Each structure stands twice: as C-alpha cells, then as structure tokens.
Image (cartoon, helix red, strand yellow):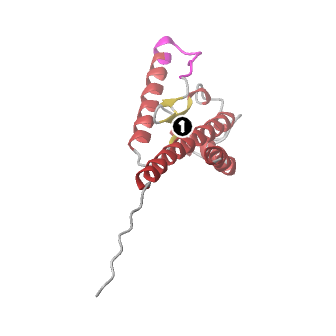
C-alpha cells in the first residue's frame, strides 16, 4: 500500500507579489540608469559633432518611453527654417519615443534630429574644422563602460 502525504505551502502569493514588485523596481532602475547613460552620450556627441553645419549639435536628444530631453531653440535661421527644424525635431523625438515604447526591452534612444545629421555622421570623407564624423558612435563607444556602471549603480540602490 502506498503512503500519501499532503503538504500545504503558504505564502506563495505573497512571494509572487514581492517578486513582481522587485521586477518593476528593477525595470525602472534600468531605465533610470539608461537615461543617465543617454544623457552622458548625448553630451559627448554634442562635443564631437561638426560645428560648421548649423544646428547639428543643438539637435541632440535622448528619448525614453515616457519622456525626452527638452526641445532646443534653433537660432540663426529664417523663421521658416527655424520652424522646419523645430517641427522635424519634434517628429524625430516622437518617432524615437514610439520605437522605445513598442520595444519589449527597456531602452532609451540617443540621436540628432536635423535632416542632414545622418549624412554628416556617416560620411567619413568630409573634413570638418571642428568635430568629426561618427560622432554619436564615438560618444557611445567612449562611454560604454560608464553607461554600464550607471545602470549597475541604479540596480544596486534598488537591491539594498
């Protein structure tokens, strides 16, 4: 004859709830760290971006699911061109925020919004008086380990 024992485990629901709470806090911590990292990369890319082509530096932005850096004021152009740059900036940032929102991962996006930014970034044959091509990639590569540390620090503060 087989022997049977009933075991009752209590507190499983509470453990699941606590795991969910910690998981949400960690997700917010990762986002907070990524935003800080994005700001760091943005600042560096603004320093490295060529200066001889108008508002490229000022068009730098960081976008995340529920926010973004403030819009720049594009100066030194006709009102029509200023309005065009401002409108384009808003569209680019909104597109970035939408991509980040749809992602299953926690993400931030760093970029430059002026229409010519991609050409200036990618064309390594151009010689600029101030700045360089691949300014965004260079900034991200330079601060890769600092970015990881910023995220890790946010996670550590949650787990304490």
Percent position of residue 52, x then y: 65, 29
- In the drawing, does residue 67 fall left or right of residue 42? left
> Residue placed farthest to the left in the image?
1
Front-lying residue, 45 or 119? 45
Query: Taking the image as drawn, is residue 114 in sight?
Result: no
Percent position of residue 121, x then y: 57, 41
Q: Is residue 49 above or below residue 80?
A: below
Give me the residue at 44% from left, 50% from top: 14
Give me the residue at 52% from left, 30% from top: 68
Front-lying residue, 2 or 12? 2
Give me the residue at 40% from left, 52% from top: 13
Give me the residue at 33% from left, 77% from top: 4
Front-lying residue, 134 or 30? 30
Is-magenta flag for residue 90?
no
Q: How many marks?
A: 1
Front-lying residue, 91 or 145? 145
Image quarter of residue 92: top left
Helix, strand or loop at mark 1 = strand
Q: Is residue 92 above or below residue 87?
A: below
Q: Residues within 10 Å of mark 1 (few under 14, many from 20)?
A: many
Percent position of residue 102, x then y: 38, 42
Secondary structure mainly formed by the magenta segment:
loop
Q: Is residue 95 above or below residue 27?
A: above
Q: Which residue is mark 1?
A: 111
Q: Which residues, given as a range, are shown in magenta? A: 71-82
Quarter of the figure with the N terminus:
bottom left
- In the drawing, does residue 90 fall left or right of residue 160? left
Is-magenta flag for residue 79?
yes
> Residue placed farthest to the bottom in the image?
1
């Amino acid at each position: 004859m087989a022997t049977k024992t009933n075991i009752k485990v209590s507190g499983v629901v509470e453990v699941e709830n606590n795991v969910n709470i910690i998981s949400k806090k960690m997700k917010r911590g990762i986002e907070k760290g990524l935003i800080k990292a994005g700001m760091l990369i943005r600042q560096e890319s603004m320093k490295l971006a060529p200066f001889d082509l108008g508002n490229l530096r000022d068009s730098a932005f960081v976008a995340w699911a529920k926010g973004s850096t403030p819009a720049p004021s594009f100066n030194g152009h006709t009102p029509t061109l200023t309005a065009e740059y401002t409108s384009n900036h808003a569209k680019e940032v909104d597109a970035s925020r939408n991509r980040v929102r749809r992602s299953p991962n926690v993400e931030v996006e760093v970029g430059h919004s002026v229409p010519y930014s991609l050409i200036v970034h990618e064309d390594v044959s151009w010689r600029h008086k101030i700045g360089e091509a691949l300014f965004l990639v260079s900034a991200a590569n330079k601060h890769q380990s600092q970015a990881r540390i910023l995220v890790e620090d946010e996670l550590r503060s949650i787990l304490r």
